Image (cartoon, grey):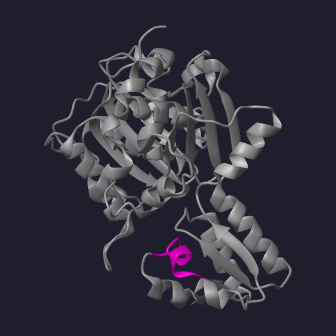
Amino acid sequence: MRILAIDVGTGTQDILLFDSDQPIENALQLIMPSPTQIAAGRIRRATENGRPVFLTGVIAGGGPCHWALEDHLRTGGRAFATPKAATTFDDDLDNVQRMGVELVSEDEARALDAEKIELRDLDLNAIRSALAEFDVDTAFDGLALGCLDHGAAPPGYSDRLFRFDHLRRVVEERNDLRAFAFLPGELPEYLTRARTLLDSVDVDAPLVFLDTGPAAALGALQDLVVAKNDEQLILNLGNMHALAFHVKGTRILSLYEHHTGELTSEQIEDFTKRLLAGTLAHEDIFSSKGHGAYYADGASVHDRETDRPLIAVTGPQRGKLRGSRLDPYFAVPHGDMMVSGCFGLLWAFAEKHPRCREQITVALGVGHAGVAAAH
């Protein structure tokens, strides 16, 4: 069985090809620039050359390409976009037009003298080409895909709050990190980026989607040092988002989410200690430009246990906590931190596709109770 796992982040897209006939440590890996970084580079080159840009494609991750577009417009450059591509920058197309972007149809774009830049989160042809150069078979038995989706918030609804309401809703419906895994037909309509990501798959194969935050946490739980503890605080410091899960196995006790770039090391320490102590209020996070804090199972902010569990850190910005007073453990599931999310995606695939479950869970070393088991 061969499963392609792709974790689409802000800085990188992390790609792992799982083969059940090989030890998990032998899984082929690619750590490549994220699609939004690639698009941002193309926009900046057009700006340097004094060329207008035409953005086509579908809704995709923003961040770097959004900032590059703003810089392009700020310098007097022109920008055109199809409505589908424009939703990358804001679900409200009026706001995109207020940025200075001119909306056009694909037909109208044919007459434009502009640099064409396609927006998308998934380019399977590029991945196939890279693997083929190393004589790797590009046939897959399934795909496990992840990205962070804020969701299409209604007008006037905070994107940060809408995203956090989604996290809270999932936990309330089923308190398990694996509950964030969705089959294509199960994805909520408002997760437009996730739906577009799955729709971009051009092969007939089983699929699963998992948000990048829970994916990293499920990956970190596969580190045997992390797994041997009954209780953990898993902190994923991504390039854009920081997401902390206080868990017992895969059961969530509490969580908070923030923007990594808005946080100092001292703030991460403070928020994490207060989450564990049960004194971190939602407004503490939201008012500092984060998403929010949540205590599961009806717990209040005053009645949590104060004994500190193991604090495990993963993610490309984990260096923010080097030498921290939290004394964190830097998780390295299966010997590789950068594909923690991919290991979590594989666990999600096993969760949603029972016929493949045993082969995957045995390879990952995860037990039926939702925690990693000794190899």
The structure residue drawn at horizontal position 35% and vertical position 59%, both measured from the top left corner, is 163
Q: Is residue 110 visible?
A: yes
Q: How many marks?
A: 0
Instruction: Judge from the rendering whether residue 57 lies leftward or rightward of residue 295; answer left or right.
Output: right
Residue 227 pos. (x, y %): 41, 18
- Quadrant, the N terminus: top right
* 225 relative to 161 in the view: left or right: right
> Where residue 322 sits in the image (x, y, percent)?
60, 34
Considering every residue shown, the one lying at the far front of the view is 204
**Along the line of sight, the residue nearer the viewer: 347 or 309:** 347
From the viewer's perspective, is residue 208 above or below residue 368?
below
Q: As displayed, is residue 187 above or below residue 138?
A: below
- Using the rendered view, name the quadrant where residue 46 is placed: bottom right
Farthest-out residue, right: 49
User: In the image, is residue 2 above or below residue 197?
Assistant: above
Residue 325 visible in the shown view: no
Residue most toward the left? Answer: 298
Residue drawn where x is 70% and y is 67% of the image: 40
The residue nearer to you, when weighing 201 against 11, is: 201
Q: Residue at x 63, y 19 (%)?
A: 25
Q: Position of residue 56 (x, y in %)?
A: 62, 75
- Residue, far top: 375
| In the image, residue 88 lies in the stretch drawn in magenta | yes
* Left or right: where 74 falls relative to 301: right
Residue pictured at 52% horizontal, 40% vertical? 143
Give residue 86's position: percent from left, percent from top: 54, 77
Classify residue 304 by image quadrant: top left
Looking at this view, is 362 or 226 the one in front? 362
Q: Which residues are magenta?
A: 81-90
Q: Is residue 318 magenta?
A: no
